[in-house]
Image (spheres, rainbow, N blue to C red):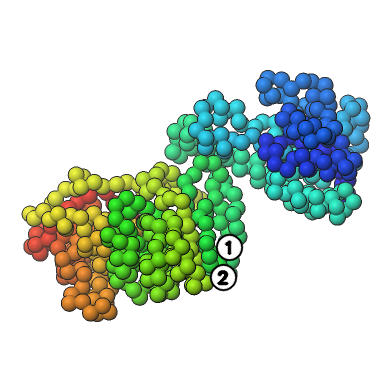
């Protein structure tokens, strides 16, 4: 059996969009309509003849609608194997009619939770009968067509029109797969709400991960890899998946990954002066805050203009024309901003390959949540690194305390360092990065690489000295030996911020004192692998 003619349909939807038109089309084709509650009312208001589920089952809807479709007259019509004699005999003996089409979407659990509803209201919006019908129909897709998404109504119309009022097995299989995904995601949302929101469990015994596909991407990290982007179901913060893409070709996997790194770091500067972040291969290569966005761009670019080519830019203010013009002077893949004026849009419009993404607001860098990383044979799960250090948390460990300017530079460098791949070393001076060393196997090399970049910048812009001279240097983890700190001192750094906690802290502190450095310990590490 391949094609199944639709003669009897059960419609029971929470989302009423398009249901009257669907009912009308089915009725014109001679399909008997069965429905429940609000859906039946909507169909009748459209002038359609509808048979109530209570008439089919012989039982009224009861218990505030909790019990209505959970009955053999419904599920027998969905689950019966129609060419199995025993099943056919049972249907005849108990007057169970076959149901050929089920159109169901579920109680709005996600919307209810996101509305801030009370616990009792959330519980009442856990659908029971709907998922049962969906699963029954999907399991028996050899005979039954299941549609769970109003976006698929047009596909259903085309299917029926192309097959004389019937559906093909291929279509039913596709809809069944989507139906099981819908109920799985629905149950995952509920389990997550119970575990995280209701029971306050960070790591429940079982974790369900769900998402809604937004788009398939051109490829993954490399052309031979496949990729797609999903957004979580249920309450979640907004970010790049919700951004408006104003121009440019579709984003790649790497574009999303790098743009997210830029956005997360830029969010650290959601308050205060205008800020610009330039990212390349998920690492910042230039970060600055200044009185104007244009000045912040200039300062950020000068940290490492070589790496900035083909990079990703995020800003914490709506883009203006002069800043957009300046960004457009070098090849830039993606720009992320909380808005852009007409002059900025016009400047970028001349750069057809540049993707401009506008977000409603910067994400909260202190938000909670879990990070998931697949590994061979398992899944690593951890809480987000949302720890924060205030000036009062710092412990001065050297004979000399940082000056006010040095302290400001220390805190700026520390903010950037938490977003740099370990081992991370960041030099900063006057609200701008002076050199960044990322992802090295030892901290000394990171310090030296960052200093080399600073010297190259000084040569490029013909400065009298690198910006590392008089800078503060941040290390994402403790200096295990004094060599990394001494490399920073050789580069001209005068202040150091680091977590502390090494067995050789005394040796490192002594080296800092001998070099005349001021050093503070944070007591908090920020590895980023």
Q: Which mark is residue 217?
A: 1
Is residue 445 positioned above or below 392 on the image? below
Neighbour class for label 1 at 10 Å: few (<14), some, many (≥20)?
some
Residue that appears at 84% across and 50% down: 160
Asked whether the beta carbons under mark 2 and mark 1 sit within 8 Å of each other, the answer is no
Q: Mark 2 points at which residue?
A: 223
Is residue 153 positioned above or below 315 on the image? above
Q: Residue 117, can we see it?
A: yes
Quadrant of the rendered structure where residue 186 is? Answer: top right
Along the polypeptide, which appears first: circle 2 or circle 1? 1
Q: Residue 286, can we see it?
A: no
Q: Where is residue 260 in the image (x, y as percent from the top left)?
A: 44, 58
Residue that appears at 48% across and 31% down: 198
Q: Is residue 321 left or right of residue 250?
A: left
Q: In the image, which is nearer the foreground, mark 2 or mark 1?
A: 1
Judging depth in this view, the residue of 229 and 79 nearest the camera is: 229
Q: Where is residue 343 in the image (x, y as percent from the top left)?
A: 44, 65
Tag count: 2
Quadrant of the rendered structure where residue 325 is? Answer: bottom left
Numbered disc 1: secondary structure: loop
Is residue 125 positioned above or below 236 on the image? above
Q: Is residue 469 left or right of residue 294?
A: left
Residue that appears at 57% across and 48% down: 211
Q: Which mark is residue 449?
A: none
Which quadrant of the figure contains the C terminus? bottom left
């Amino acid at each position: 059996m391949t094609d199944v003619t639709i003669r009897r349909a059960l419609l029971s939807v929470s989302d009423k969009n398009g249901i009257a038109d669907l009912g009308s089309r089915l009725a014109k084709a001679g399909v008997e309509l069965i429905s429940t509650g609000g859906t039946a009312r909507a169909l009748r208001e459209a002038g359609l003849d509808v048979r109530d589920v209570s008439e089919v089952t012989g039982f009224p809807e009861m218990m505030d609608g909790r019990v209505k479709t959970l009955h053999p007259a419904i599920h027998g019509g969905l689950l019966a194997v129609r060419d199995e004699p025993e099943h056919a005999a049972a249907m005849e003996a108990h007057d169970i009619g076959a149901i050929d089409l089920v159109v169901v979407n579920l109680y709005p659990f996600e919307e209810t939770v996101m509305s801030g509803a009370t616990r009792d209201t959330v519980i009442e919006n856990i659908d029971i009968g709907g998922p049962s019908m969906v699963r029954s129909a999907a399991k028996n897709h050899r005979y039954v067509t299941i549609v769970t998404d109003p976006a698929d109504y047009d596909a259903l119309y085309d299917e029926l029109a192309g097959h004389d009022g019937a559906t093909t097995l291929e279509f039913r299989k596709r809809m069944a797969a989507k139906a099981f995904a819908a109920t799985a995601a629905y149950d995952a949302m509920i389990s997550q709400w119970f575990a995280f929101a209701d029971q306050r469990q960070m790591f429940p015994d079982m974790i369900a991960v769900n998402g809604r596909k937004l788009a398939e991407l051109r490829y993954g990290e490399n052309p031979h890899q496949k990729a797609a982007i999903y957004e979580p179901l249920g309450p979640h913060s907004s970010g790049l998946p919700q951004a408006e893409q104003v121009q440019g070709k579709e984003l790649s996997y790497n574009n999303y990954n790098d743009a997210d790194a830029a956005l997360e770091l830029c969010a650290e500067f959601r308050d205060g002066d205008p800020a610009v972040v330039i990212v390349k291969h998920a690492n910042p290569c230039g970060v600055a805050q200044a009185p104007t966005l244009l000045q912040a761009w200039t300062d950020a670019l000068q940290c490492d203009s070589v790496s900035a080519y083909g990079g990703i830019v995020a800003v914490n203010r709506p883009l203006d024309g002069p800043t957009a013009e300046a960004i457009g002077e070098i090849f830039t893949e993606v720009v992320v901003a909380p808005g852009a004026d007409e002059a900025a849009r016009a400047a970028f419009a001349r750069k057809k390959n540049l993707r401009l993404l506008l977000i409603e607001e910067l994400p909260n860098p202190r938000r909670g949540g879990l990070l998931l990383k697949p590994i061979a044979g398992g899944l690593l799960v951890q809480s987000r690194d949302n720890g924060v250090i205030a000036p009062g948390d710092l412990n001065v460990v050297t004979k000399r305390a940082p000056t006010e300017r040095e302290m400001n530079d220390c805190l700026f460098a520390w903010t950037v360092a938490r977003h740099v791949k370990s081992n991370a070393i960041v030099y900063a001076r006057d609200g701008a990065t002076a050199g960044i060393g990322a992802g090295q196997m030892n901290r000394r090399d990171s310090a030296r690489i960052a200093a080399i970049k600073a010297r190259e910048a000084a040569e490029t812009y013909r400065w009298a000295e690198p910006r590392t001279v008089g800078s503060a240097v941040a290390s994402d983890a403790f200096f295990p030996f004094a060599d990394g700190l001494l490399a920073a001192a050789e580069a001209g750094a005068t202040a150091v911020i680091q977590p502390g906690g090494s067995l050789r802290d005394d040796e490192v502190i002594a080296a800092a004192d001998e070099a005349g450095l001021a050093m503070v310990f944070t007591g908090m590490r920020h590895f980023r692998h």
